[in-house]
Each structure stands twice: as C-alpha cells, then as structure tokens.
Amino acid sequence: MFSWWTSGSESEALQVLIDKYDTETGGEVSNAAVSGGGGANARQALATRLQGGDPPDSWQLHPDQDLFAAVADGSVADITSTFEDNGWVDVIPQDVLDMLAVDGKYYAVPVNAHRGNVLWTSPSVLEENGITWDDSTTPDQFMADAKTLSDAGVTPVCLGDKDVFAASQLLETLIMGRVGGDGWNSLFSGDLSFDDADVKSAVEDYVDLVDMANEDHSALTWDQAAVMVGEGDCAANLMGDWAYGELLNKGFVENEDFGYVTMPGTSEVFDYVGDAFVKPAENAPNAEGEDAWLSLLLDPTVQADFNLKKGSTPIRTDVPLDDFPPYQKGAANDFRSKQIVSSLAHFQVAPAEFAQAYADAVTALNGDGNVDSFLESMTAAQSSLLG
Ligand code: GAL
C-alpha cells in the first residue's frame, strides 16, 4: 500500500486503515509509504514502479487531473462495479464524483476532503500585537498587518517549504484571495491570464511574505512549520487542514494554542485537496486484497476514525459529525456550502505538466523574487499547456 503519509498524524490516520484491513481480512498490509509532504518524492518512486511493471496493490493520488492522467495512461483499473455494489454514488458529493469519473466510469475511492486555504494562527501572538483576523479581513489589511508584525520583530507567516508544495500552496491561496473562486477557475479555462493585475498583486504579496518569513523556511517541512504556530513562534502558517491533524497529534489545543481563519479573501472558497486510492489495471500482486482494501475505505466508522486523525472532512455525507471537534464541524459545513475549487499546488486542477511548470516557477521565484519573470513563465505555460 503506497502513499506519502509519514508525518505523526498522517501515519496514525493511515494506521486506522491498515488496522481495519488486518482485522477484517486476517491479512497484513505492507506499508510502502515514501516520505515527503505533498508527495513529490512518492510520485517519482511510484512512476519507477509502474514503469517496471511492479505496481503496488493500491496507491494514493488526488482526484481530478491527477487521476485523469492515470486513467489516460492506463495504469489504474475501472472500479465502477465496486462503486455500484457499495452504493457510493449516493453518499459522495457530485462535485467530487465528477473528479473521480471518466466517461461515466469510476477509477478511485476518495477518503476525505482537505481544505487548503486555512491560516493556522497563534492566538497569543495576534493578541499581543493587537491583530484580529476574521472572514472579513481583506488581502490588503492582511498584508498591512503582516508588515506591522514584521516591524515589531514577529514572523507574520512561517513557512516550511523544504517540499515545494507548501510554497506553491501559499501562493495559490493568495491568488484566490485576490481573484476569487471564479477567477481561480478562469486561470485554468484560459479566460484569465496569469499576468492579470490581481494575480500580480498576489505574487507581490507572496514575495513580501517570504521575505518576512522564518529564515530557515526552505529547510523545514510543512509539519515543522505548523508546530511553530502552536509554539507561538510566528503569527500564522498557511497549510491544508492536515496541519489540524498534526497540531492535535502534537498535543496543541484548539483555540488555546492555535486558532484558524481562511486566507483573507477566500472565506467563500473551499480549496479542495482530496486523497483517493486506486488499484492497478494490470500486474496486480493481490487482486482480492485490493478489493477488500478499497471497500473498507468508505466504511462509515473507518471514515470517522480516519478523518478524525487526518484533520479532514469525511467524504461520505452521511457520517455523523457529533464527535468531531469544532474546526472539523465547521470545515464539513463549509465543504457542503461554499464554492469548491481544486488545487494547483496538489496537481488537481490542471494537467501535471502545468502543475509542474507552476512548481518550478515558484521555486525560481523563491530564488530570485522576480515577479515579472514568474508571470511570464506562467503566461507562457498557460498558452502552451492548457490548450
Ligand atoms: C497532500 C495530501 C494530504 C497531506 C499533504 C502533506 O497532498 O492530500 O493528505 O498528506 O499532502 O503531505
């Protein structure tokens, strides 16, 4: 079983699935996780295995374009009958179903909805500096506050972008804050150019925030940066709500050690990052085990136990949320009521070549801070790769 879940909370969440498999089948899961948040390392290792005709029984990927590429290259099996046998189409939101199907056939089992546009905040740092952020905070106000914090010697936004997705995701949510959910979608339909003035402002904000960030940001992983918030070492950290799972896993207490607010300008948007599992189209090592594995992922109790550890929203809409903590109740509610958009940093909303061009452009931007050259690269990528 192949994934990139190796942080404290990720491992514990994965263990829920593994334990269920062991109890149900009497079998044993071999955990082939490859470390590296966001899965860049795992993606490479997986490609090598698939090319060598040595697929795992099941692997993690994202719904939407990430899955569609795997369907197009023939590596994942059609599991429509598993969907039908289990009645899953009735309990999974349509927006998500659309990101799992090609020509009416299903290819992946979704396990959760992570929200990508959350700022995890330090209540004590914000209070000491007289700063309040809520759903009405504008991007301009946020940037002014960041400057105030930095001038006072406080790191406004801490970052852990050893794995580039953390930087890509920070910029993604800043762009969403300036262009909105519809504007975001227009970037991928080609109706909005990357050299749009609002996108440019967001990229400028990004460069300013990275300038004010912790100096060791490129040496830290996402979970190390999340812990900095819990310890009051910065005012905020932008991260998907896997950071919620991680903060709880590390013993931090919601609304005491940390708080949260959506990235300013994005309160009406749910930046969806989903995890899903597939099985190989051929060379299956253990076909029977694969079906048992995929089926248990959407068992209602497994959904509750897994997502409680992971920080995400259960993908089944019929899972009771009474035992979920406040953040997750709110996120689940938002998942059902806000505009769902799909993440670029996580290779969902656009083909891999475009998502990779974005990751490379962010890496270059981190090195040279050159906003114009970033916008040029992205505009070029937009016209050559989005078709
Ligand atoms: C995302 C994934 C999350 C979390 C995160 C950090 O791509 O959807 O489940 O694992 O990476 O590793």
Image (spheres, grey):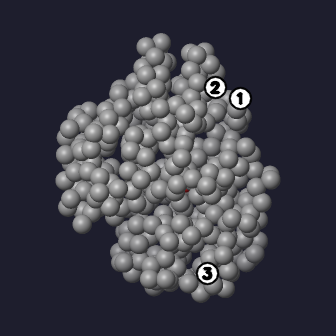
Is tag 3's residue or tag 1's residue first in the polypeptide sequence? 3
Give above or below for 70 relative to 10. Answer: below
Circle 3 is placed at which residue position? Answer: 83
Q: Provide the secondary structure element on which disc 1 rests.
A: loop
Residue positioned 80% across, 53% down in the render:
322
Is tag 3's residue or tag 2's residue first in the polypeptide sequence? 3
Circle 2 is placed at which residue position? Answer: 123
In the image, is the residue at mark 1 within 8 Å of ligand 1 by its beta carbon? no
Identify the amino acid type marked 2. Pro
Q: Is residue 11 visible?
A: no
* Residue toward you, 329 or 178: 178
Is tag 1's residue or tag 2's residue first in the polypeptide sequence? 2
The crowding category of the residue bearing disc 3, from other C-alpha atoms within 10 Å (few below 14, some 14 to 19, many at least 20), is some
Q: Provide the secondary structure element on which disc 2 rests.
A: helix
Residue positioned 61% across, 60% down in the render:
112
Give above or below for 55 relative to 269. Answer: below
Which image quadrant for residue 223?
A: top right
Identify the amino acid type marked 3. Phe
Query: Which mark, residue 256?
Result: 1
Q: Provide the secondary structure element on which disc 3 rests.
A: helix
| Contact between labelled residues 2 and 1, with CB atoms less than 8 Å apart | yes
